[in-house]
Structures are given as structure tokens and as C-alpha cells.
Image (cartoon, rainbow, N blue to C red):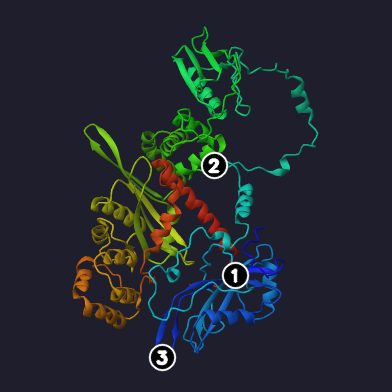
Amino acid sequence: MDKSWIPSGCDPETAFRIEVKIEGFFMKQIDGRKDYVKGKTLKWVVDSDRFSLCDLRSDLFDDLCWGSCQTPKIWMFDKNDGREVEVVSESQIPEMFRMFQNERKISLLTVICDLDGSSKCSGTNFTYPCTPSQPSPTIALGSQSHIGSSQGCNMSGQPDQSDNLDEYVGFNEESLYSSDIEGDLAHEGANHAIDGVHIDPEEDNVDEEPTVEAEAIEDNVHEEPAVDDVVQCEPIIGFDPKKGRIDVNALFPDVNAFRKTLRHFAIKNEFEVHTLKSDKKRFIGRCKHPDCPWRIRASILQDNKTFMVKLLPAEHTCPSTTMVDGKMASKSWVSDRVGDWLRKHPSAGAKEVKNKLEDEFHVKVTYRKAWLGRQGAIDQIHGKWEESFQLLYNFKAELEKRCPGSIVEVDCKSDGNKMFFSKIFVALKPCIDGFVQGCRPYLGVDSTHLTGKWKGQLAAAAGIDGHNWLFPVAYAVFDTETTENWTWFMSQLRNAIGTLPGLAISSDACKGLAAAIATVFPDSEHRECMRHLMENFKKRYRGDVFTTHMWPAAKAYTIEKCQHHLSEIASVSPEAIAYLEKNHKQLWCRSKFSELSKCEYVNNNISESFNSWIKDLKDLHIVDLVDQIRQRLMVTFDKRRIVGAKLQGMSAK
């Protein structure tokens, strides 16, 4: 186990890492004022033999500022019970260290609660919010045995624009709630029938003696002669990739196989081949080094197909040309070398391909050649780009057959007598039902650029479930962001989820999206992402007054407080307010949000989370892209089903 995180002076046998996530809260002053304190994550290294609950509360107070009428409540995950429990006694601390002895890392959640009973977490009936701690990188701390890595409290009341702790959207966090969730999935998969065939283990009894009828049948069955599958005229490939040799009289199926083998042989042995003569019937070459005696001659046999090495007078012994940018490492060679590797690492880019080949074969490969070779390997794995568009109808038919109720719409456009792909929309039945029946009526809508050969847009609509985890609802692919394409996408989305009461849709400044939402969902609440609004706003207006008052105005819960901050901006720059009223007509102030959606997010973190979730798929062929997202959704829902079955407690009705 890596122990670089253990500071000097701390016993490695008793050192533990503790990460305490603190939810954002409002600190109540004695005079009744409330100051917002943004959430943070504290990271400590502690000595388990000397650490106590009293130390934990004391260190929290040193790093936080809360009012005299408030108190912290600390929560941890109990492995024994499989649920979250509140840390209230000293006896829980030693047990906590014993439970996480193997990980040597403990994640805690702290919520600042009111003592007057007005807070949602006051009293003994508090239900732990099911938002897990956000994972953070391990850092090496200082020489003390107990050190916090956070800064002091933010007493300005101005939440930082990069602070998303109070608008958390989780994804890929199922393993935080089940230490062996992959094992659970494998165990359940082994218990399922294969291809609909039920296998009874009792029927497979190897010790059961054969019946009389079976013996009679066996007596009448004549033993079949052995079949030799080896075709005598089939050429034997003489190149062994492990040994990296080409021998005299070695045979190859055709001239292309010989050329590929020779190229790999040269790269493996770190030299370049200079071609003297090459056509469909013969090949003559030598080492490019002028003093090297290595030569090779090969020609076609009488079958006009098989190639044979006929002359190889000397072993290659000249100085190596390691890491010289030569012609041997072609894009076809790159494709052949990384094809199997890309099947296991589909998200690897051209840079990873380049590094892999240079490390393994000691040959310099340009980035362009690595990129072209990678594309060729992907074409070999998934087929041509043109074919992938034609397979979309097969995808549609199979998905609608296997998952009835799912919506898959493929739209084409004509150019003369030819039809071309235009766009595709996908909404799985579980995603539709899960959102309508189990999620708040709140959607984040956005699109991201595709990075493959076809430079289109991947659009998506996603919500958050009761666990504050990302819940994708629908996704689509089209060529560009236009009002027509967004209207088509939103129309398909309406067909899937209907017109929900209190629906709120959050988006950034996508071209044509605002008009599409107004047309298709005229009764919905359209919110604009505050982060994107500020990026555009700062291009025109800069100064302390804007950074001090814009974010508090957006995050204020009351209209009076929001108007106070906007008035401060108007007193300095009235044209800034006029700009906001003219160019940002959607809702971006929390005080103006409807309460029906039960979601107060001012940033479109949902869409950003979805884009991060699928970023390694954006260069795939179109049919593989939509199918890989489908597969990822199925795996995610299966993991969450396992997590949900292990959770205990009361759910909201």
C-alpha cells in the first residue's frame, strides 16, 4: 500500500486519512442576520490511537464558523449495518477505525443544524441526506499528525462561482455504497438463465450409470474417422512476432501479408528497409544503412498467390535506428498493432497510441500517423462510418423489440435521389418511467461536440433522482445547433415524458434552444445557467461591484435581497442591468424560481455531469455511440438497484 500520504512523525500502523465533507449552510448571528458559509471538504491525517470524538468536534470548530444556536451533526457509513449512522458517542470512533482498517481512509459528512428546532436536521427524527461525499485526490500533508487542508470560513456571503457543493450532481458513485458491487453483479449474472434456457444442476450428474437403452445405442454407433483440418496446400506463415524473425523459404498468403510482416520485422529489429524492387510478383530490399550486408528477396509461386522468401544471405547486425522518425511505422502498421489493444481500451486517444507504440517498439511515431492508425483500427473494429449510419435502423428495431415502450426516432433528409442521415433520438423506457414517476420535474438540457469523423452534436436531457444522482432521460445526435434541430429534439422529448406540471428546464446559451423550449414547452419554467451567464457577462462588464453582487443576487432566496444586490450594480452601471434584461430573459435568480420543481439549482451542473460521463465515447461511430450510452445506462441502473436494495430507512411518500 502506498504510504506517501503519511506525514513524518506519525505511526504508519495507526495513521488514517479522514475526509469530512461539510454541506453549505447559513450561519446565524446573534442579531438575527444570516451569512452564507459555502461547503468545503477537510482532509486530515490522524492517529487512530489518540483521536476521539471530542478532537473531531474541536477541529471542526477550528476550521468552521457556526452560530451559538447551531451545532454540527456528523455522519458515517456503517459497513456492518449497510447504512448511514450519526456519530454521537466516543465508543463509535474505535469501531469506525476497525471497519476501515483495510482502506485506511474514512469519509464523513457534517451538517450544521439549528438548535431551535427550525432546521430540517433538528431533533432525533433527522434523516440523513443521501448525497455521498465527493471523492477527492489524496494529498501528502505536513509533519503534524492532525492537519486540516481547508481555508477559513467565507464570511462575505458571496458563494464562489466554482462552488458546486450546494448543487451536487453525482455519477459513477455506486461503489461508495457497496464495496463489492462488481462482485454482486457477477454473482447475479451467474444465477440468470443463459439465452432463456434454464439449467438444473441436478440434471448434470456425471456419476449416474448409463441405462440399458443408452448402451444399446452406443453399440450401434460406429466410430467416426479423425478429421484433419489442416489444408496441405495452405501456406505456413514464417514470421513469429515473439521472436521477430523472417527465415528463408517462409511462405505468406499474398504480397500484402509479406509486406506487413516485413515492416513489423524491421520495426521490431529497429532498422529501416530500403525497397529496390516491389510489385505484385516480387520484392527486393536491403537495409537502409549503407554498410549493412542484410538483403532480402521474395517472389510469387506458381499458384500466382503465395509469396516465399528465397534469399536472405545475412543476419541484420547494423547499428540501431531507435526513435528515428522513419517510413516503416505506417498508419496501416499502427492499425494492426493497436487493434486488439483498442478493444480493451476504447477510450484511448492518439496520444496514448503514440506513447504505447514508442515504448513497446522503440520507434518514433508522429501524432498524425498515430491518429490515422487509430482511426483505421476503429474502422476495422466497428466498420466504416458510412455503414454505421445504415445500422441505425437495425438498432432502432432491436431496441424497440427488446425494450418495449422505448422511443427511437431516426430522421433523414433527401438530396436528389439519395437519402442522408439527419438526426436520431433515443429514450429508453426505464429512463422515461423513472423520471416521470420518481424524479423531480427538473431537467438540464445541453449538447456537446462529437470528436469523431462526423462532427455533429450529442444533445441530452437529464434530471436528478432522490439521491441527487445523475438520471439521464433522453439523448439525441444531430449535425448542428439550430432552432429546427432543437425543436425536433424537444418535441420528441415531450412525446416521451409529456407535459409535467411544474416542469423546470435549465440550459445555457445554446443556439436556438430558448426558442425551441418556448415553442414545445410553453408552460415550463426556463432557467438559464448562471455560470454561462457570468462568462458572457464578464466579457462586457468587469469590476469588483459585479463580482461582489451578481452571484449573491442569483443565489438569494428572497426577492428583496436579490433586488438589493441588483440595485448596487445599477448604481454603478445602469447599462449592465439593461443588458441583462435584454439578453438574458430566462430565469437566473433563485428567488424567482417556482417551488413546484423542488430544485433550486442556478447552475446547469446536470448537463455538465452528463457530458463528463460520456466524454470517452464522443469519437465512436454513430451506431456505437448511441448503443454504448444505452449499455452504460443499463449497467448504472443495475448498480443502483443493488445499492437501493441494501439501503435502510424511511423514504419520502
Labels 1 and 3 touching (C-beta < 8 A) = no
Verify CB contact (< 8 Å) between mark 1 and mark 2.
no
* Separation (CA) of disc 1 from disc 2: 40 Å
Q: Which residue is mark 2?
A: 344
Amino acid at pointer 2: Lys
Say which label, 2 or 3, has the lower sequence index. 3
> Which mark is in front, 1 or 2?
1
Labelled disc at residue 32: 3
Q: Is residue 222 above or below residue 75?
A: above
Say which element carries label 3.
loop
User: Percent x, y for residue 459?
Assistant: 35, 52
Q: Residue furthest top?
A: 302
Q: Nearer the viewer, residue 291 or 272?
A: 291
Q: Earlier in the sequence, mark 1 or mark 3?
A: 3
Q: Is residue 400 above or below residue 294?
A: below
Relative to 18, residue 487 above or below: above
Query: Which quadrant is home to the N terminus?
Result: bottom right
